[in-house]
Amino acid sequence: MFLILDASYQLFRNKGRSLLLTCVSALLCGCVAFYMGNILSSQKALSTINQTTPAIVHITNQDADSIDNLTIPYTRADVLATTSLQKILATCQAGGAFSEEAQAEDPFNGGDTTIVGGTNLEALGIDSDKAFTYGEGYDSSLLDGNQGLCLLKEDYAQSHSLKVGDQIELPIHVVKYTSDRIPLYFFAGMGKLTVAGTFPANTKTSQPADMFVPVQWLREQFEANSGDPFAYNSFGGELADSMNLNDFKASLDELGFTQPFKIQKFGEWGDNYDRSEGAAIMMDDEDFIKTAEKLGETIQQFQIFLFPFFGVVVGLVTLSIFLVLRGARRDMAISCSLGRPKGLIGAANLLAALGAELIGSLLVLPVMILLLGIPSGTALVVCLAFLACALVGDLAALCLLLRFDALSMLTASQE
């Protein structure tokens, strides 16, 4: 009990000394927070890189000269989607016959309505839908589903006297490409669609169209009305686990894909192959690799210098305690001459110093949470790490300060 009273006396009686120790502690604790905050932020960025900068996968042909206007069997696309992708970017082209003249085409050769099915706006190459006009309750997420909804180009809607909310029924023909990149049309039945919105004619897209529909609806429409297997014209997406990029590349053979430019037919290498068939994988992973490598190097560098950094903090705490308490050595000598053990003297000063350092770290705590964005639990760990360094520094400084002979010091001070 007396030890606590003595520590409180040391802390509150010497207000200037305590204030100085508190300010120094707050500064050093802030340095620890900044250093560890950099490590934590880099680790968080690396752990979320799969959401912010994922590796992009595209199915391409063997020449790797296109990721659009291909014939990609649904079996290959489904394998890739279910095993490796977290966000799918797929399209399928089709033609529609709205007018009687287009419906009379035989054989069908594109009709009067260009249709593109997509999984989302990104798959269609559309950056923003701010200029789109949606019906009540609809937005761009309609492309994610399988409902009979469509977005019409404004001039197409005007020329056919269509508006949002109208119903459309027209024959639809899905596109597949031959080995010579010639489109062939396969009947997919009569499509019944609701106009869910319109988009400006000058909208920049990767595949211009009069009508955008959900690709899943187009697939189901085709499979229900055609005896041919469905095929996408482009397919890809974000890799579900970009951190295991090398493992994914190694598994391509098992997934049924080849590397681009590896052309093989009947066991012999040659040029007789389908240039429209989507059978190879093209990776867009440069940004992911660069970002991951940079973050990894940053974390490694900070971790390498972590213990030297804490050593510097301990040294600064030792120096500050030694300089601040050096003037109190005479008081320590008097207490010692009165029979108080050096151990208790040191313990009282240690508790007083730790009290000032605790106050300093608590002052920095809200700054770490509110300004630096460090989670409260992590901020407490930072404070505890600093206090651990402070304890080591305090002990080192007090060991140096208590190495005195009380009688010699008092005698010298009287002289």
Image: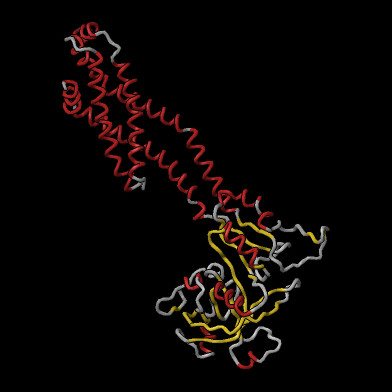
Which of the 4 image quadrants contains residue 14?
Answer: top left
Q: In this view, does 192 lie above or below 263?
A: below
Q: Position of residue 78 (x, y in %)?
A: 60, 64
In the image, residue 411 sits, relative to residue 52, either above or below, namely: above
Q: Which of 381 and 279 is in front in this view?
A: 279
Q: Residue at x 49, y 55 (%)?
A: 51
Number of labelled discs?
0
Location of residue 205 in the rendering, given as x and y in whole percent from the top left corner: 57, 72
Tell me: 368 left or right of 411.
Answer: right
State the image coordinates of residue 133 (x, y, percent, origin top left): 45, 79
- At x 65%, y 71%, the residue is 231
Above or below for 54 versus 357: below
Q: In the image shown, does 195 or 299 lie closer to the viewer? A: 195
- Against 204, is 389 above or below? above
Front position in the image: 307 or 240: 240
The image quadrant that residue 321 belongs to is top left
Quick one: quadrant of the C terminus? Answer: top left
Residue 200 image point, x, y percent: 51, 79
What residue is at 47 percent from the left and 33 percent from the top?
305
Residue in the image at 59% along x and 74% along y: 219
